[in-house]
Image: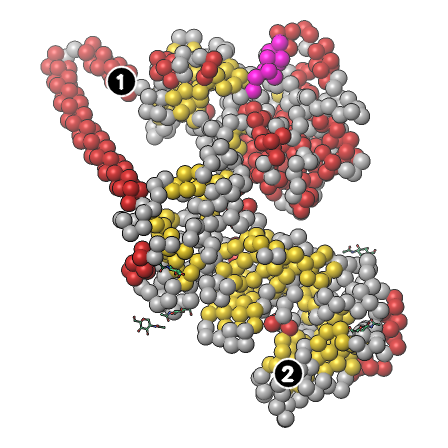
């Protein structure tokens, strides 16, 4: 009996105590009555059938259901989900006809299985099996026939071996649908099933609307849904034969309890419980957690990339170029060359995609026939050679425009898409050109090698014969100048291109104002384009390094060798005369500060994207602080130094520049304060002390800015004069942390994750550096939901008066204040 059954029910059960002995079993026979207070327990003591009230005492509605025996109430099946008993009396009876009926006090029928067709010598019994399946079968166990089973009518839970799908012979379709709320088992909004039987896919719906879809089955998995198949704990099966078509999962470890549930909010989740070890259900995976699986996210012929950015398939262009690029946009794509059916259309192979929706499985065709049949039907837009049913027919086709694609490089699915003759021609031309370029390059290289080989031979001949060291030396000098690479002494494989000033001036249009894209603590940034068309960002350092030219180049090489997906890549440098410049890859999405403060753009940043960005920055910073060969303190971490690539992966820029100026030690006192108002830790801003913990402080500020969409230094609140940190701290102490969340974020189901990020950020901005965690700890805190966090102490700089404090303390070197002011104006 569940612990939460309230008092009247317990009294009720006392009245019927005399019946209890006959029911300490897993079966119920036609002449037994089963009332509130009694339960059937499966022989393995795992499942229990009885009456329960959901919602931890919040309601007195009574349901007949199955739950785990000896665990906090976890219901896996409900009989009368849409028809609760309101007055705490229920009675379950099995009739001779095999009809299992649930009565209320006035003997009205609340729920029943309906009559079964039984033969004369058949005595039905109800049994709760070890699998959690409630069945009506013959008393004689040698008769294997099952008249009715609860596994045919699941509610919101799939247990191992429960078959989700179709019994074709009796026309039964089984599916799971969510509870309305966690306290109300009646049929909710979300429905998950295998549909349709002709071309089976797994689909999550809300009403008639598709929300998520995986499929069709490609022989090993449902296309695009790896998490639905692979796990060390369970394996999923798709079975098709003449009478059945279903999806189910099998548990690989018997000592583990597991359930596959659709939550009242529409999440499809897999939970486990280790018998005698766990204290609670452990969420192993949420199947619909990839935003790219949101149905039809990128429209026709658009493919969704990680974190829901959309791109057109090659050969297609956006319907409306303006809105394309960042987030959800369903305008889709159109063909670059229109089809002209029957006039030379053909197919182009695309790999690494999740299959589109609305597949049609076409009869009995082999590979070649499939292409021909699709080509001959003008509305057939694509085909794939997959054997959905495992019976040898390998032809799935798509009639009409392709929708709900996602980039899925792990998958092995290949789809052949119909293309116009002119598109095929363009592809062939491009290939030919590519080949020509390759051949020309190869020939050129051979010629150059021959010539230079000849030249070297000739020169060495001169050297040998004239024995003139002078010539030898000038030859070497000439050679190194013509290659224009800085060699790295320790690791000969690495070469950093050294650009000459002229190239850079030309690329950046003489550093014209028009090309300027930002201004930071160490100098200005310009956009440029190299003669080969490559776009670059050039950072022109204002300061003169204290190091000599060679040391400076070596330092730049060391920094350029730091490569990480969350760091901006350095392509090369230019050190000439007074100029020191770093050449970076150019990222068109610009920097984080262009996204998070503006209302229209920040509305597009969902919580999942923000979380992805936060974790990416943490990873990049962790690499700089700990994982790279150099231990780099950034010293000027701020939103304008975080660039975003097309998939919204954050990339830290401007790292290592302090080292270039020869000033980056572990913990240093510096007169020159390079940093930005609002992001500087108190010990750095006031005393010039900096360490990795100063970067941690800046990181905390950035996290709060990402969460709130507000600038720390420009934060205003009508009720007080605190800055963003102070405001967050105040809300934290009032136990209202979520108030700080940007109101344009609407995914409330991630509340706990948001609170966790706020908590971590507050730990980062604590006043004393020794209280702040290290980046490695921070990364773990963000990643592991169950990690214990300490309570944060007061942040440094909570008040607006930060400005005043800072000004007075820094008055003895006012140039610093000016510099700080300058850096706040810009922002790249
Ligand atoms: C149910 O209610 C009891 C008492 O009100 C409380 O102690 C317990 O934590 C609640 N359980 C859940 C799961 O809410
Ligand atoms: C019992 O169930 C019947 C049929 O569902 C219904 O009409 C009747 O009102 C119920 N009686 C009570 C006391 O709930
Ligand atoms: C769990 O503990 C019970 C009682 O100690 C024991 O009977 C049972 O075998 C254990 N189950 C497993 C799977 O270890
Ligand atoms: C395979 O099964 C499908 C679905 O029933 C059927 O349409 C097709 O003809 C079968 N192919 C072969 C080769 O039996
Ligand atoms: C499929 O085609 C093969 C040969 O073309 C034939 O032998 C077989 O009977 C066909 N199967 C069905 C189900 O039509
Ligand atoms: C193309 O195939 C679809 C789906 O099988 C079918 O409904 C349609 O009639 C076919 N069109 C032609 C012209 O054959």
Q: Position of residue 421 (x, y in %)?
A: 28, 45
Q: Quadrant of residue 117?
A: bottom right
Q: Is residue 562 magenta?
A: no
Q: Is residue 819 magenta?
A: yes
Above or below: residue 705 compared with residue 517 = below
Q: Residue furthest left?
A: 465
Q: Is the magenta region chiefly helix, strand or loop?
A: helix
Q: Which quarter is ligand 6 in? A: bottom left
Q: Compared to 291, does 634 lie above or below? A: above
Quadrant the N terminus occupies: bottom right
Q: Residue 482's mark? A: 1
The residue at the far bottom in this view is: 121
**Crowd class of label 1 (few under 14; some 14 to 19; many from 20; radius 10 Å):** few
Q: Indicate which disc residue 116 carries.
A: 2
Q: Which residues are magenta?
A: 818-827
Q: Position of residue 492 (x, y in %)?
A: 34, 28
**Residue 666 appears in the picture as rendered:** no
Q: In the figure, is residue 282 to the left or right of 537?
A: right
């Amino acid at each position: 009996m569940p612990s939460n059954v309230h008092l009247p029910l317990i009294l009720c059960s006392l009245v019927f105590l005399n019946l209890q002995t006959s029911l300490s079993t897993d079966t119920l026979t036609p002449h037994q009555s089963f009332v509130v207070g009694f339960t059937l327990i499966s022989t393995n003591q795992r499942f229990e059938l009885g009456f329960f009230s959901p919602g931890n005492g919040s309601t007195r509605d009574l349901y007949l259901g199955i739950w785990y025996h000896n665990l906090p109430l976890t219901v896996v099946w409900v009989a009368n989900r849409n028809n609760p008993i309101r007055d705490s009396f229920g009675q379950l009876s099995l009739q001779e006809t095999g009809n299992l009926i649930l009565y209320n006090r006035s003997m009205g029928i609340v729920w029943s299985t309906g009559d079964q067709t039984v033969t004369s010598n058949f005595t039905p019994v109800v049994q709760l099996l070890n699998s959690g399946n409630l069945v009506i079968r013959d008393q004689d166990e040698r008769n294997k026939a099952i008249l009715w089973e609860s596994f045919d009518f699941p509610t919101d839970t799939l247990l191992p071996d429960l078959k989700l799908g179709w019994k074709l012979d009796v026309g039964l379709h089984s599916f799971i649908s969510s509870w309305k709320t966690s306290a109300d088992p009646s049929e909710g909004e979300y429905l998950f099933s295998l549909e349709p039987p002709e071309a089976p896919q797994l689909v999550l719906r809300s009403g008639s609307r598709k929300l998520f879809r995986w499929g069709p089955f490609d022989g090993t998995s449902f296309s695009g849904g790896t998490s639905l198949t692979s796990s060390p704990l369970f394996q999923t099966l798709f079975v098709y034969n003449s009478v059945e078509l279903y999806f189910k999962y099998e548990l690989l470890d018997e000592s583990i309890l597991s359930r596959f549930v659709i939550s009242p909010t529409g999440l499809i989740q897999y939970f486990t419980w280790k018998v005698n070890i766990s204290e609670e259900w452990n969420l192993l995976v949420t199947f619909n957690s990839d935003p790219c699986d949101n149905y039809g996210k990128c429209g026709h012929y658009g493919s969704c990339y990680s974190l829901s950015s959309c791109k057109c398939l090659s050969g297609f262009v956006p319907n409306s170029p303006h809105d394309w690029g960042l987030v959800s946009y369903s305008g889709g794509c159109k063909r670059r060359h229109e089809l002209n059916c029957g006039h030379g259309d053909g197919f182009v192979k695309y790999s690494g995609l999740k299959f589109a929706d609305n597949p049609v499985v076409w009869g009995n065709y082999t590979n070649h026939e499939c292409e021909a049949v699709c080509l001959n039907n003008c509305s057939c837009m694509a085909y794939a050679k997959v054997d959905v049913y495992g019976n040898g027919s390998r032809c799935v086709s798509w009639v009409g425009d392709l929708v709900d694609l996602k980039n899925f490089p792990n998958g092995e699915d290949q789809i052949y898409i119909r293309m116009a003759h002119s598109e095929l021609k363009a592809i062939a031309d491009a290939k030919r050109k590519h080949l020509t370029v390759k051949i020309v390059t190869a020939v050129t290289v051979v010629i150059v090698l021959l010539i230079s080989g000849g030249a070297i031979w000739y020169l060495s001949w001169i050297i040998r014969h004239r024995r003139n060291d002078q010539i030898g030396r000038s030859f070497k000098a000439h050679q190194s100048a013509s290659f224009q690479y800085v060699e790295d002494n320790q690791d000969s494989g690495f070469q950093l291109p050294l650009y000459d000033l002229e190239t850079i001036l030309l690329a950046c249009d003489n550093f014209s104002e028009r090309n300027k894209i930002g201004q930071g603590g160490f100098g200005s940034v310009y956009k440029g384009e190299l003669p080969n068309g490559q776009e670059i960002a050039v950072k022109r350092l204002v300061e003169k390094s204290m190091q000599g030219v060679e040391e400076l180049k070596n330092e730049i090489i060391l920094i350029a060798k730091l490569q990480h997906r969350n760091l901006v890549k350095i392509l090369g440098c230019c050190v000439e005369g007074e100029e020191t410049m770093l050449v970076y890859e150019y990222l068109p999405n610009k920097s984080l500060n262009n996204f998070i403060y503006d209302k229209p753009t920040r509305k597009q940043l969902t919580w999942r994207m923000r979380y992805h960005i936060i974790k990416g920055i943490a990873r990049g910073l962790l690499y700089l602080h700990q994982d790279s060969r150099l231990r780099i303190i950034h010293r000027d971490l701020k939103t304008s130094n975080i660039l975003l690539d097309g998939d919204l992966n954050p990339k830290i820029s401007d790292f290592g520049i302090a080292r270039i100026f020869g000033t980056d030690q572990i913990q240093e006192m510096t007169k020159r304060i390079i940093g930005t108002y609002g992001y500087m830790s108190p010990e750095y801003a006031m005393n010039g002390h900096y360490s990795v913990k100063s970067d941690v402080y800046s990181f905390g500020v950035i996290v709060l800015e990402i969460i709130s969409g507000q600038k720390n230094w420009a934060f205003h609140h009508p009720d007080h004069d605190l800055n963003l940190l102070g405001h967050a701290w105040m809300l934290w102490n009032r136990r209202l942390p979520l108030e700080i969340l940007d109101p344009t974020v609407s995914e409330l189901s991630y509340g706990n994750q948001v609170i966790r990020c706020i908590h971590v950020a507050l730990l980062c901005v604590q006043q004393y550096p020794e209280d702040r965690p290290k980046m490695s700890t921070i990364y773990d805190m963000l990643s592991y939901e169950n990690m214990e966090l300490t309570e944060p102490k007061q942040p440094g700089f909570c008040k607006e008066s930060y400005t005043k404090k800072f000004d007075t303390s820094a008055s003895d070197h006012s140039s610093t204040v000016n510099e700080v002011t300058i850096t706040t104006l810009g922002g790249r």
